[in-house]
Image (cartoon, grey):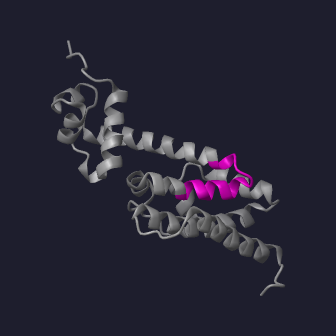
Amino acid sequence: MPPKAKFTKEQIIEAALNIVREEGVQNLTARALGKKLGSSACPIFTVFENMEEVQAEMIKEARKLYTKYIEKGLEFEPAFKGTGMQYIIFAKNEPQLFQLLFMSEHLILDVNRYFPTIDENYDVILASVKDYYSLTNDEAKYIYTHMGLYSHGIATLYARKVCMFSLNDVSRMLTEVFSSLLRDIKGDTRND
């Protein structure tokens, strides 16, 4: 009979998530996890086969947390701007999780595949800009890619704790860049 688990799967994942939040993914070890739980590392392995499995589950939880930010952004008017702001706020509030999810190495050579590959919320975010502004799919992807890269840059500054912009500044900058891209798509060049 296998030994009775001292901790639940949820307790272990929560502890792992907290280690990453506080110290970064590089510090998520069996020993650190055991210490966080007030135990040795052994009880972890009555629930999980190995640390790779713990890390995979922890990443799922981090993605769920990020998705809550995006869902909040989708409630904003316009939703596309809300999701961009929430992406940046996630980086500000959860810098280690942001770095884990969005600043890890990805072998994606095509910029047009970057966001669909790294963000499982891509389709709903794309729909928010496409539907609200009555854009074609290609137009929406064009704007999403440009705004995504711009937002990612600002979010990275926050995640690395080198951002000097207030969230009001960020909101204004996102609006300015988005408006310019939208004018470009709609063919309005009066301000150029």
Work out which residue is located at the far bottom of the displayed protein and give it. 192
Residue depicted at x 55% and y 48%: 120
Q: Residue drawn at (60%, 58%), measured in percent from left and top? A: 85
Q: Is residue 75 above or below residue 178?
A: above
Dominant secondary structure (helix, strand or loop) of the stretch shown in magenta:
helix
Q: The C terminus appears in which quarter of the rendering?
A: bottom right
Residue 28 placement (x, y as % from top left): 26, 46
Q: Which of 171 and 53 is in front in this view?
A: 171
Left or right of residue 79, residue 158 in this image: left
Left or right: residue 54 compared with residue 170: left
Q: In which quarter of the image is the N terminus?
A: top left
Rendering quarter of residue 71? top right
Residue 23 is situated, as x and y percent measured from the top left of the image, at 29, 51
Q: In this view, does 150 lie to the left or right of 93?
A: right
Residue 102: x percent and y percent? 45, 58
Seen at 44% across and 44% down, the residue is: 62
Write the start and end of the magenta stretch as one range: 73-88
Q: In the image shown, does 127 or 99 lie closer to the viewer?
A: 99
The answer to whether residue 101 is above or below residue 188 is above
Look at the picture and state if 116 lies above or below 35: below
Up-down: is 13 above or below 95?
A: above
Q: Looking at the picture, how far across and down is residue 95, in whole percent?
A: 41, 56
Report if residue 173 lies within the magenta region: no
Q: Which of 5 and 173 is in front in this view?
A: 173
Q: How many labels does the image show?
A: 0
Q: Residue lying farthest top? A: 1
